[in-house]
Image: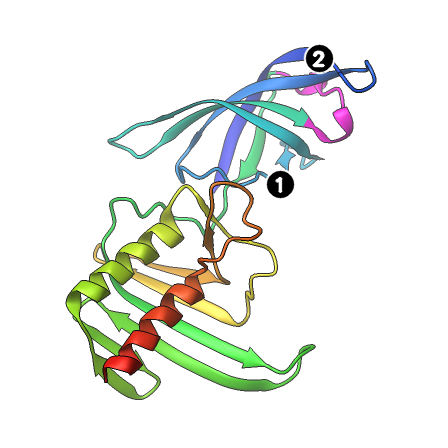
Amino acid sequence: MKTYLTLEKSISHKSNYDGSIYKSYVTSFFSYTKSHHTINDFYDEEGNVYIPEVYSFCEKKVDPDTNEMFVRADVEFEDGLDMDFLLHKPLYFREPEWFCDLTNEEIVQLDCIFEQYELVLGPLIERNNISIFMDETVQINDKIYHFSKPIIYDFFDEIRINLGSEKTYKPLLSGACSSRYTLHLKSGKAIKYSGDYALCDGIPYGCKRYTKLIVDDLIKQVYESN
């Protein structure tokens, strides 16, 4: 999704480190993802790219009817560049296409494909196709199992938070080719994810509760109960 903003005003700062002067810029925009994922770059109408370095979020307000979030932020650019020439001109950025706010959504099915390869781009060793349904059915490759509904409900609730919270991150080096998911919602929407995702309050490094681990825990319980 392409999002539009303007740099509303500049603020001069004096560095405590070396006394140099640098500028930050106040901006505001509306976000439909409610996410706080890193914005990699801004670009103008001519396609020129400008790289932001530091964000300080000053204000966030969510409209409960539209789920739209108003964000006001203070932005510094890479290498402390003076960007006054961009003031009041339209800038754009893309919000992460993989992210979908699932706060008010109901999941009815999760399809997973897990692939294991030999090291260094070697051949495929194993592929597992797993489908988990809200009706207590779990299909692992060509075998079907029936499972406890409360556990399935808890599982889908954790998956909903894992994949659709404003604290969801898609970490680097997350196995984009070896873990793939399709989330089916009661509304009829199907959302595809590639890689494993984490729920973190800060940067995702060190997070342990990735999507595949949530699925693996459920599959372990399925095998133990059958």
Residue beneath the point at 28% across and 81% down:
224
Is residue 78 covered in magenta? yes
x%, y% of residue 203? 56, 44
| Numbered mark located on residue 72 in the image | none
- How crowded pointer 1 is (Cα within 10 Å; few <14, some 14-19, many 20+) is rated as few
Residue beneath the point at 38% across and 45% down:
165
Report the magenta residues as a range: 77-87
Compare marks 2 and 1 and give the one earlier in the sequence: 2
Q: Secondary structure at mark 1?
A: loop
Asked if residue 80 is positioned above or below residue 195 in the image, the reply reads above
x%, y% of residue 204? 54, 49
Please give left or right for residue 157 compared with residue 127 in the image. Answer: left
Distance between the Cα atoms at labels 2 and 1?
A: 23 Å
Q: Quadrant of the C terminus?
A: bottom left
Is residue 47 covered in magenta? no
Residue annotated with mark 2: 13
**Residue type at numbered disc 1:** Asn
Camera-side residue of 155 and 71:
155
**Residue type at numbered disc 2:** His
x%, y% of residue 46? 67, 33
Q: Secondary structure at mark 2?
A: strand
Residue sticking out furthest to the front? 224
| Numbered mark located on residue 40 in the image | 1
Camera-side residue of 29 and 59:
59
Asked if residue 162 is positioned above or below residue 57 in the image, the reply reads below
Camera-side residue of 11 and 205:
205
Residue beneath the point at 51% across and 63% down:
195
- Count all numbered tags in the image, as a single digit: 2
Asked if residue 51 is positioned above or below residue 221 in the image, the reply reads above
Asked if residue 82 is positioned above or below residue 153 in the image, the reply reads above
